[in-house]
Image (tube, rainbow, N blue to C red):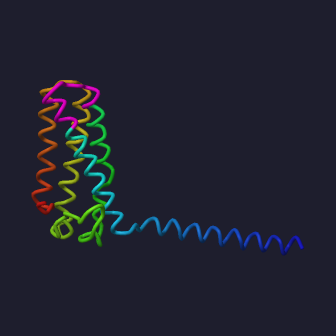
Amino acid sequence: MKQGLKKVLISTLAITLLAGSAGVLAQQAPKPENLIKWRQSAFQLVAWNTGRIKASVEGQYNKDEVQRAANTIAAIANSGLGGLFAAGTEQGKGWHDTSAKPELFKDGKHFAELNASFGKEATELAAVAGGGDVAAIKAQFGKLQRTCKSCHDDFKSKD
C-alpha cells in the first residue's frame, strides 16, 4: 500500500509541477492588448511626473517633489519599456487605440537607440535632481524632453 501511495503522490506532484510550468509559460506571452495597456500606463506615469517637474522648476521649487518625480521617470525609462512594443501590438487597443506608428516595428534599431537615450537622460535627470541646482535640472529636463520629442516625431501618430 505504501508503494502505491508513493506512486500516486509522485504522479500528483509531477502533474502539479507541469501545470505550474504551463502557467509560467502562459505568463511569458501576455496578450497584445495587455502590452498596449501597460505601455500606455507607463507613459501616462511619465507624463504625470514630467508635469510635476515642470510645475516645480517653473513655479515654487520643491526639491523633494522634483527628486521623486525624476526617480520615477528614471525607473520607468529603464524598466524595459521596449519589450512592451512586441510583435502583435502594431495595432490594437489597450486603454485606447495604440498610437504607435507601424515604422516603430520596422525600425527596431532606431527605436532601441531612442529608448536607450531616454533611459540615459532620465537617469541623468534623477542624478542632477539630487543636487538641487534648478538651472542644472532645467537643462537636463530639456535634454530628457528632447528624447521624448524625437521618439514621438518618429514613432507616435498624431492625436
Task: Give the residues drawn in magenta, as a range.
Answer: 52-66
Specify the quadrant that holds the C terminus: bottom left
Task: Report the label total.
Answer: 0
Residue toward you, 41 or 74: 41
Q: Residue at x 29, y 72 (%)?
A: 88
At 27% from the left edge and 63% from the top edge, which residue is drawn?
Answer: 85
Name the outermost residue toward the front.
96
Q: Which of the two residues, 55 or 74, is positioned nearer the viewer here?
A: 55
Residue 91 spot, x, y in % from top left: 24, 71
Q: Position of residue 22 (x, y in %)?
A: 54, 71
Quarter of the image with the N terminus in it = bottom right
- Look at 21% across and 41% down and name the residue there: 50
**Residue 135's quadrant in the figure?**
top left
Q: Is residue 87 above or below residue 78?
A: below
* Horizontal side, residue 122 vs residue 83: left or right: left
Q: Residue furthest right?
A: 1
